[in-house]
Image: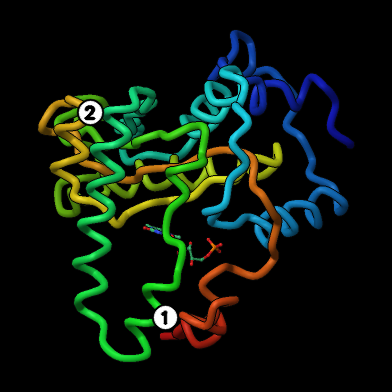
């Protein structure tokens, strides 16, 4: 069976997580062409640091957030919290935080590595029309603690899962996402006036990319090659 509008809509309609009656929908079959396209999506998803400045429609951002909210989460606790960072002074505080954190990081490298690090572009905050901070609510009562007793970090991992979905959902629509982690989390938390128990998971720059690449930027610039999956897999 190929996909019909009926089968596509619950997963891709922006603002409805689980529309009424959706449990009766026929599950889609992802045909070979889709499977290939899905691999293309994985291959062509990139961390983007070079953005065009043209704005993104608000509906697109809200749609991406809704799609991110379809992510799995421990105990179904949905701990992700999104903050659209719009105010110029808040953006500036976070941009300044990047400068400090980046300088500190640079200080830890020496010689050729330091020179290479300094040449990398590690954020796109000056151009990206949308900036989105993603937090994990460490005190959420949703999920009633299921799955977190021995591994409380699962809460944060759930928020990461949401970011990953957002990243892929964006790429499908030709929208680029860049994850900035070279930041002082406390500074970001304060700049955005969010509760103390919200842990910063990701600061995302979002917009239309200036260029598309199949090879990651850090590979292209000689920082870190891809590792063969076989070298990352054990059998026991
Ligand atoms: C948790 C996480 C944090 C990251 N932080 C940064 C960052 O601060 N600056 C940056 O330029 N890229 C950052 N990246 C992007 C990675 O550099 C990128 O994913 C990696 O080089 C592979 O490239 P690709 O995403 O294009 O495949 C981050 C990615 C992840 C998953």
| N-terminal-most mark, 2 or 1 | 1
Residue shown at the point (20%, 45%) measured from the top left:
148
The residue nearer to you, when weighing 101 against 70, is: 101
Picture coordinates of residue 120 (x, y %)?
Answer: 45, 69
Residue shown at the point (14%, 26%) measured from the top left:
195
Q: Distance between the residues labelled 2 and 1?
A: 32 Å
Residue shown at the point (22%, 48%) measured from the top left:
97
Identify the coloring.
rainbow
Q: Name the residue under label 2.
A: 192
Find numbered disc 1 in the image and state the secondary structure of the residue it sits on: helix
Picture coordinates of residue 174 (x, y %)?
Answer: 70, 41
The residue nearer to you, when weighing 102 against 180, is: 102
Q: Which image quarter is the N terminus in? A: top right
- Asked if residue 135 lies left or right of residue 70, the reply is left
The residue nearer to you, when weighing 183 against 146, is: 183
Q: Nearer the viewer, mark 2 or mark 1?
A: 1
Dividing the picture into quarters, in which one does residue 147 lie? top left
Q: Mark 1 points at which residue?
A: 116
Residue farthest to the bottom, as pictured: 111
- Asked if residue 162 lies left or right of residue 208, the reply is left
Task: Say whether marks 2 and 1 touch (CB < 8 Å).
Answer: no
In the rendered image, the vertical position of residue 116 relative to residue 57, given as above or below: below
């Amino acid at each position: 069976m190929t996909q019909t509008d009926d089968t596509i809509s619950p997963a891709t309609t922006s603002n409805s997580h689980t529309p009424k009656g959706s449990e009766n929908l026929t599950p889609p079959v992802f045909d070979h062409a889709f499977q290939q396209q899905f691999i293309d999506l994985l291959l062509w998803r990139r961390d983007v640091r070079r953005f065009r400045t043209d704005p993104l429609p608000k509906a697109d951002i809200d749609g991406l957030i809704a799609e991110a909210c379809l992510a799995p989460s421990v105990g179904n606790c949905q701990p992700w919290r999104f903050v659209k960072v719009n105010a110029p002074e808040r953006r500036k505080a976070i941009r300044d935080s990047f400068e400090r954190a980046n300088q500190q990081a640079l200080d830890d490298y020496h010689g050729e590595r330091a020179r290479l690090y300094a040449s990398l572009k590690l954020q796109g905050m000056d151009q990206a029309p949308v900036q989105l901070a993603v937090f994990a609510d460490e005190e959420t009562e949703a999920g009633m603690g299921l799955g977190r007793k021995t591994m409380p970090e699962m809460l944060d991992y759930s928020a990461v899962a949401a970011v990953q979905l957002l990243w892929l959902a964006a790429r499908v629509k030709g929208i680029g996402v860049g994850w900035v982690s070279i930041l002082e989390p406390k500074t970001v938390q304060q700049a955005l006036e969010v509760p103390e128990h919200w842990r910063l998971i990701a600061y995302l720059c979002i917009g239309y990319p200036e260029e598309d690449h199949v090879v990651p930027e850090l590979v292209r610039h000689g920082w870190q090659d891809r590792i063969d999956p076989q070298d990352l897999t054990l059998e026991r």
